[in-house]
Image (cartoon, rainbow, N blue to C red):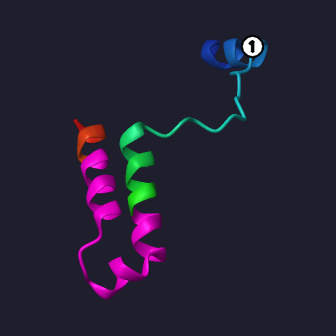
């Protein structure tokens, strides 16, 4: 005897999507900020970097 729910699944298997979901804009902005701070010599030295400030503000705005 097969349970009724299993019969439904066997008749119509669930659809599987192979597409990668889009990142929320907050994650995207954070990745840009992180990528910049890892490659910028000014950021890595600990000095003030205007690009880092702009990317940080964009990240905070995207999180709202």
**Total numbered labels placed on residues in the image:** 1
What stretch of residues is rendered in magenta?
34-59
Q: Quadrant of residue 37?
A: bottom left
Please tell me which residue lies in front, 32 or 52: 52
Q: Give how far across and how far down residue 64 sits, in percent.
A: 22, 35
Q: Which quadrant does the N terminus fall into?
A: top right
Q: Determine whether 46 is above or below 30 in the image.
A: below
Please tell me which residue lies in front, 3 or 33: 33
- Toward the front, the furthest residue is 50
At label 1, counting other C-alpha atoms closer than 10 Å, the crowd grade (few under 14, some 14-19, many 20 or more) is few
What main secondary structure does the magenta stretch of the protein show?
Answer: helix
Residue at the spot of label 1:
12
Q: Residue at x 23, y 46 (%)?
A: 60
Check if residue 58 falls in the magenta segment: yes
Q: Quadrant of residue 42?
A: bottom left
Q: Determine whether 8 is above or below 55 in the image.
A: above
Q: Residue at x 30, y 39 (%)?
A: 62
Q: Determine whether 35 is above or below 10 in the image.
A: below
Q: Give how far across and how far down residue 52 sits, in percent.
A: 32, 63
Check if residue 46 falls in the magenta segment: yes
* Helix, strand or loop status at disc 1: loop
Question: Could you tell whether 36 is left or right of 42 in the image?
Answer: right
Q: Residue at x 40, y 48 (%)?
A: 29
């Amino acid at each position: 005897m097969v349970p009724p729910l299993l019969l439904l699944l066997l008749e119509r298997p669930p659809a599987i999507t192979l597409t990668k979901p889009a990142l929320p804009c907050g994650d995207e902005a954070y990745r840009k900020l992180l990528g910049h701070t890892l490659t910028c010599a000014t950021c890595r030295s600990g000095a003030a970097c205007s690009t880092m400030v702009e990317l940080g503000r964009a990240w905070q705005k995207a999180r709202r």
